[in-house]
Amino acid sequence: MKTMELVHMLARGGGDAPRGTAGARMALALAAGLGGSALLLAAVYGVRSDMPELLRQPLFWMKVSFPLAVLLAAQALATRLARPGMRIGTAPALALLLPPAALWLAGAGWMALAPSSQRVELLLGTTWEVCSLNVALLSLPTLVAMFWFMHGLAPTRLTAAGAVAGLVAGAQGVLVYSLYCVEMAPPFWGVWYVLGMLAPTMMGALAGPLLLRW
């Protein structure tokens, strides 16, 4: 059979994909990843005992808003990359750059206003040695779930799809880790949270060509 005959046969035999398939699959992947990360947090780290008081602090919601914004932008990009031939566009890419840019700007202002003797402490906190590793660990359940999501929708740009799947996982890992992390300084988040997100992003980029092939 010639190539064009095969293409025409497949086109005649196929139908439209059910509406909402990608959205439902994404929601299931995020819910499964969130549940797995939450269980891992409870088993390995636990939740802060002062959480009720913490919820009343505006700085806590600023901390949570960063990974949440990255998560929303990355999942929109992941939905596009999961479908063959779909254009990414500039809006999702720009939306992905805005949260870290805003955080770095806030962190720079925070450092500029702080006394010079406190700047190193603002940058390193007390948990810099383990923070990024903890985020990467908590991202693993979502990374597995996101690869399941991607594989079911036949992506063609495998490295990019894997990287974005990892970024979604990293953002959700930071979101869950915020329930345990004691650091409350934007300069700290701008370095160690971002590095924690980059770890699963790189893992996803490396694993994409191997695990998302179809």
Image (spheres, rainbow, N blue to C red):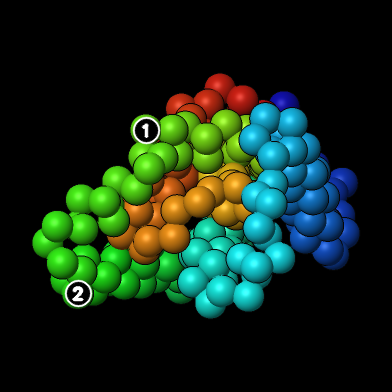
Does residue 104 sit above or below 212 in this rendering?
below
Q: Badge 1: how crowded within 10 Å, few (<14), some, or many (20+)? A: few
Left or right of 43? Residue 111 is left
Closest to the observer, 168 or 160: 168
Q: Mark number for residue 197?
A: none
| Residue 86 makes an appearance in the image | no
Say which residue appears at 26% left-offset and 51% top-offset: 121
Dividing the picture into quarters, in which one does residue 20 lie? bottom right
Residue 115, image x, y percentages:
15, 67
Q: Quadrant of the C terminus?
A: top right
Residue 86, image x, y percentages:
58, 58
> Label 1 belongs to which residue?
129
Say which residue appears at 21% left-offset and 58% top-offset: 118
> Label 2 belongs to which residue?
113
Does residue 179 sit above or below 95 in this rendering?
above
Label 1 sits on a secondary structure element that is helix
| Residue 169 makes an appearance in the image | yes
Say which residue appears at 87% left-offset and 59% top-offset: 18
